[in-house]
Image (cartoon, rainbow, N blue to C red):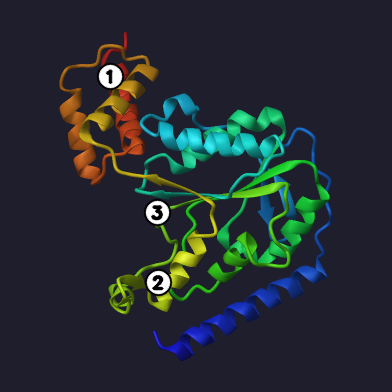
Amino acid sequence: MTIDSILLNDVLNKASRLLDRLDSSQNPIKNQPLEKDSFALRWCKTKGITSIQWECPISKDNLLHIDRQAKLLMDNTQQFVEGFTANNALLWGSRGTGKSSLIQAVLGCFNLQQLRVIEINHNDFSDWADIVYWIKSQSPEKFILFCDDLSFNEDDASYKEVKAALDGSLTSLPDNALIYATSNRRHLLPEKLADNQLAQHINGEIHHAEAIEEAISLSDRFGLWLSFQALTQQQYLSIVEHWLKQFEIEQPQKEYRELALRWALQRGSRSGRIANQFARDYAGQYFIANKQD
């Protein structure tokens, strides 16, 4: 992609965001009061903050083999809800390893302490000034802005708005809000081999090319990095056994291990999500086979 095309895409993106703002000015978003019992919220361009029906889909006790990540995120959230300093968090790594589930499980632990969750899409960061204004108006309430699957294409300039939101904007994140995001990419932006080849080795030090520095500068604005790796075979099977017990199958047939491994092989991944999906399928077939006529 040429420099001219990148500049053109940037201009078009800015023009599109300007049109969005002009359109919203014709239908101004009211400064809605926060409903007392509503702790799950979503940002909508046309309606502002809206309440959503949300129940924590999974208990933290059902998330196995990520104890270190869970403790760090739990401690960070505890600091935040008690009014102390805390960091924005980026959970990155292999798909299906519990990143989104952990965030939701941790947030579910603090809803009784009046912690609110705002679901936000990365495209919504163009409305950052409006979001910040609304959050500040709700102080001293505490908010986690939850951005799932945060990543950008090489021609997507909106990542600059996320950078500014995290650190460097005049309308920076207020003290009563944090951002928790998940991504399959550590640096959120695509990395090319050619970019790494432009790095220089000077006096024993590595000097990254500008493209690599740009990619790193985005994820570097998250103070807390938590990595999630693919499971070993034994870890995967232990999660399968855990879910089978949750589905009230105490003594599954002996061949379930072979079936579980075959299931993972077909999906090309060993993860907590895959283990849960296999256990659901196995349990359903088990109870149908043992159903009393």
Label 1 element class:
helix
Question: Which mark is nearer the camera, 1 or 2?
Answer: 2
Q: Earlier in the sequence, mark 1 or mark 2?
A: 2
What residue type is disc 2 on? Answer: Ile
Q: Earlier in the sequence, mark 3 or mark 2?
A: 3
Residue at 49% across, 66% down:
217
State the count of labels: 3
What residue type is disc 3 on? Answer: Asn
Residue on which the image places disc 2: 212
Image height of 80 relative to 170, above or below: above
Distance from disc 1 to disc 2, alpha carbons, whole Å, reads: 51 Å
Q: Are marks 1 and 2 in contact (CB under 8 Å)?
A: no
Question: Which mark is nearer the camera, 3 or 2?
Answer: 2
Distance from disc 3 to disc 2, alpha carbons, whole Å, reads: 17 Å
Residue lying farthest to the front in this orientation: 203
Local packing at callout 3 (Cα closer than 10 Å; few below 14, some 14-19, many 20+) is some
Residue on which the image places disc 1: 286
Residue at 21% across, 34% down:
233
* Front residue (pair 118, 19): 118
Label 2 element class:
helix
Local packing at callout 2 (Cα closer than 10 Å; few below 14, some 14-19, many 20+) is some
Residue at 57% across, 39% down:
76
What residue type is disc 1 on? Answer: Tyr
Residue on which the image places disc 3: 184
Q: Which quadrant, please, contains the N terminus?
A: bottom left
* Front residue (pair 71, 240): 71
